[in-house]
Structures are given as structure tokens and as C-alpha cells.
Amino acid sequence: MTDNNQQFASDNYSGICPEAWAAMEKANHGHERAYGDDQWTERAAEYFRHLFETDCEVFFAFNGTAANSLALASLCQSYHSVICSETAHVETDECGAPEFFSNGSKLLTAASVNGKLTPQSIREVALKRQDIHYPKPRVVTLTQATEVGTAYRPDELKAISATCKDLGLNLHMDGARFSNACSFLGCTPAELSWKSGVDVLCFGGTKNGMAVGEAILFFNRQLAEDFDYRCKQAGQLASKMRFLSAPWVGLLEGGAWLRHAAHANRCAQLLASLVADLPAVELMFPVEANGVFLQMPEAALDALRGKGWRFYTFIGSGGARFMCSWDTEEARVRELAADIRGILGA
Ligand SMILES: *Cc1c(COP(=O)(O)O)cnc(C)c1O
């Protein structure tokens, strides 16, 4: 059990889930070949191919910033540009890493609705300039689930990928919370990725219950050419790779990846339902994944902080963000909701 110190600032405040932990323990016996040439890495990659029902190329990186940046760099040249939403993590929270690792591919932000790009917003940015003086659009990156806790439906993804095809753009998905989207939509990983036209997916492990690690899945295998070298050069090739890959085996083999996401999503629904009736609280976005965004008077936010609660107000479009994770306790959600109600005098 916890010491009741759970916070809602981010889903990465949580620890390591039992399944990932047990797999790391199992991997911690004797010697294994290094740099990904081990049985755990092979098994993890096989589980991904099985889960996604396709023969994709699989790589492992330490974190999401590296996974996204290196994946994007592999989809374009330095004189190309990458279209993303104005609230995208790659734009607002990666310190310019996508531009750095691509040697300068410019991010072009497009308008989004509830955190989502649309075919129109992509088209607008992609066709704004077509002269030699402007970086040529080559990639669209979208986030599933989005930074504001919403999820793209398969038909929305298909409409976007059709637009991409039409405009000659590759499609990348930042899936830091891909599991949460699968759970909410009741869709298979295949449906939300390659079957909807996604070329490359960064599948988040950290926020799903691992200590560290993201998987990079290339459904379009040609785009993976030399990606192993790119990872190595960027300092993302783990020498004891088995400890990055074994936790994936733990998460994937018994379905923990989906159970944990479902739990986090349920906690977010609970939190939203416990404060939704308060007139001073506005739910900023539909709650579809594991995040709840609340607009509240500044004084109320200060009072919440005063009671020891931690939450972010700089993500997405302002307001207070509350994230639930694989281990969030219902009692703690109820405590938070009670404090919000108490502060607002309800
Ligand atoms: C957390 C997160 C990432 C990964 O961030 P790192 O801190 O680099 O692991 C990527 N995209 C989104 C949308 C995220 O929320």
C-alpha cells in the first residue's frame, strides 16, 4: 500500500508496476548479451508484433523525448518540416529536441480542437507556402491520447492519414498514453495505428507503469533504415538493454498494459464525476483518457496548493491538470475531490 502521498501532477509520479518489476527481477539472472542482442529484447519485440498483428520493426529508447525526436528525424531531412498541434508535447515540452536531432527540421504548429489536429488544420499549414524559401512539410505528428486527455477516433485518424497521403506526408504518433486511448475507445492497437495509416508509433512505457522506456514501432519498415545507428549516436542504445525490454514483456504478456490504462482512466472519470456539478469548476475537455483539466478560480488553486496538492497548470491550454496513473487509489481521488469541494464551499 502507499503512504497516502499520491499526487495528480503527472502519471509519471507513480512507481513501477508489479508486472514490470517482476520481469526486471527475472531478467536479473546471470549474464546476457548486450546492446539488444538478448532474449528479453527479442521476446519484447515479438510481443509487440503479436499485439499489433503485424511484422513491424521495434526499437527501445530511454524516454519519450528521445523516441519522438529520433522517430521524427528518421521521417524527414533537415530542410523538411513537421506539422504538429500547437499543444503538442514535441512543441511545448521537448526543449527543441525534435529540431536538434533532425538537424533543424522546423516544427510548424497547426490549430487544434480539443487537442486534436484535423485534416483542415493540417492542409492549411501544409499548403500555406510551397516555395523554396520555406521548409517543406514532410511529416505530421499527432498525440494519442492527446495532451489534453482526449482521444482520436479511428475515423479521425483515417481522415488525417488520407490527407497525409494526399500531401505526401509521413504520419507519426506520439503514444505516450497510447494504452489509455486503446482502453477508452475499446480499439485494438492495430486499429489505432497502422490500420489507420500511422507509419511510426512511439509507445509509452513510463506512464503505463515502467521505470523507464518507450518503444518505437515502425509499421512502414523502410522508414526504419539505419534507425539503430541513429539511436546509438543519440546515446539511446542501452548496453544492458534487457532491463529496458524485459519490463515490456511483463506489461504485454498478461495484458497489464491495458488493465493499468483502464484503471487510470476510471480514476479520471471518477474525479471528474465528483466535481462536475460545482458551478465554480469548469471541465475544460471531455475526459477520455487519464487526465482531468479543470478551470477554477486562481484563489481556489492556491488553496489547493496550500493543502499540499500538486498539479500542473502549464500543459495544454492552461487550467489545472490532474493525472491519474496505474496505481492511483480511489480513496485519494475522493480526498482530492473533497478538498476541491471544501475550498469552493460546496
Ligand atoms: C510524458 C510525455 C512524453 C515523454 O516525455 P519524456 O519525459 O521525455 O519521457 C511524450 N509525449 C507526451 C504527450 C507526454 O505526455
Image: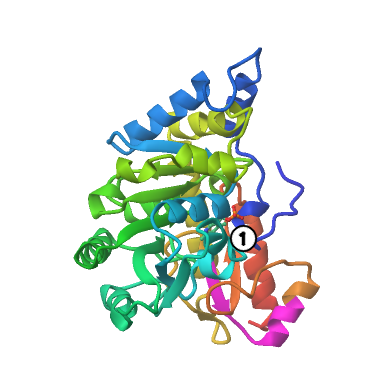
Q: Which residue is mark 1?
A: 333
- 33 over 150 or under it: above or below: above
Can you tell which quarter of the image residue 305 is in? bottom right
Question: As drawn, is 174 to the left or to the right of 23?
Answer: left
Q: Give the x, y percent position of residue 24.
A: 62, 27
- Name the residue: 58% across, 79% down: 318
Question: Which element type, helix, strand or loop, lies under badge 1?
Answer: helix
Asked if 116 appears above or below 260 in the picture, the reply is below
Q: Is residue 214 visible?
A: no
Q: Residue furthest front?
A: 132
Q: Nearer the viewer, residue 322 or 313?
A: 313
Q: Quadrant of residue 345?
A: bottom right
Residue 136 point in image, percent of width and height: 35, 70
**Residue closer to the observer: 158 or 253:** 158
Q: Is residue 190 left or right of residue 306?
A: left
Q: Is residue 161 above or below residue 303?
A: above
- Residue visible at 70% across and 54% down? 6
Q: Which residues are magenta?
A: 292-303
What residue is rendered at 65% in x and 70% in y? 312
- The front one of 173 and 273 is 173
